Amino acid sequence: MEKRFNLSLEAVLLAAALALLSLSMFASSGKLPTEVVITGWLHVEDTQVEDVVLVVEVDDDRCQVAELLGNGRFIITLPVAAKARLVFQKPGHLEKVVLVDTRNAMNTRAAMKANRKVKFDVVLESEIKRTGRRYEGAVGTVSFVNGSGVMKVRHHEKLVAAQPSPVPSDH
């Protein structure tokens, strides 16, 4: 009777091993994701986002559509292996730019579970609070570590004096 118990335990272990093997084969035969979805929240003091402009420049040669919902949530889908410049603009507020590089997003052994979804928030500040100032370049970058696909975020929120607008000459 004890021997029969060992046989059924061996059978269960063998079945489990076969199931894991078939799952890994199924997962490896699946197609790798071809896009990275970026979602987040855009916050403004007056909570009005109707006049916000969200520009998505991909690979320096094309603009792409981004969805901005009435509650400030944004959704952007970028191709894998792309570089994008996300520009957030609202009249009376400082412009913010976020750079995204998806080149290594799927460069991982577990690419099927890789960083297909990225989330972050953007806060637009009133020009009144930062009179005569602007951000120097991008306020942040999102990239992925080569080999692991781990997301890396950096903040660069350096304010500098805004350039005065040129005065037209009377000729």
Image: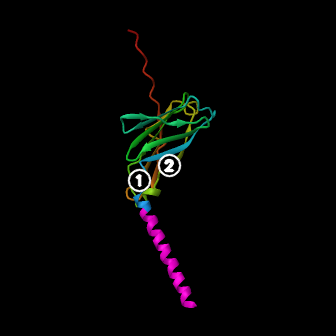
**Rendered location of residue 46, percent (x, y):** 63, 33
Residue with the mark numbered 1: 32
- Examine the structure image and report whether residue 21 is included in the region drawn in magenta: yes
Q: Main secondary structure of the magenta part?
A: helix
The amino acid type found where label 1 is placed reads: Leu
- Judging depth in this view, the residue of 73 and 18 nearest the camera is 18
Residue 96, how many percent across, how many down?
A: 49, 37
Q: Residue, x 63% and y 34% (percent of image)?
A: 47
Q: Which residues are magenta?
A: 1-25
128 horizontally vs 102: left or right: right
Badge 1 marks a residue whose secondary structure is: loop
**Split into 4 quadrants, where in the image is the C terminus?**
top left
Residue named by callout 2: 118
Which of these two is toward me, 113 or 147? 113
Residue shown at 54% from the left, 27% from the top = 91
Which quadrant of the structure image shows residue 110?
A: bottom left
Q: Position of residue 123 (x, y in %)?
A: 56, 39
Q: Comparing marks 1 and 2, which lies closer to the viewer?
A: 1
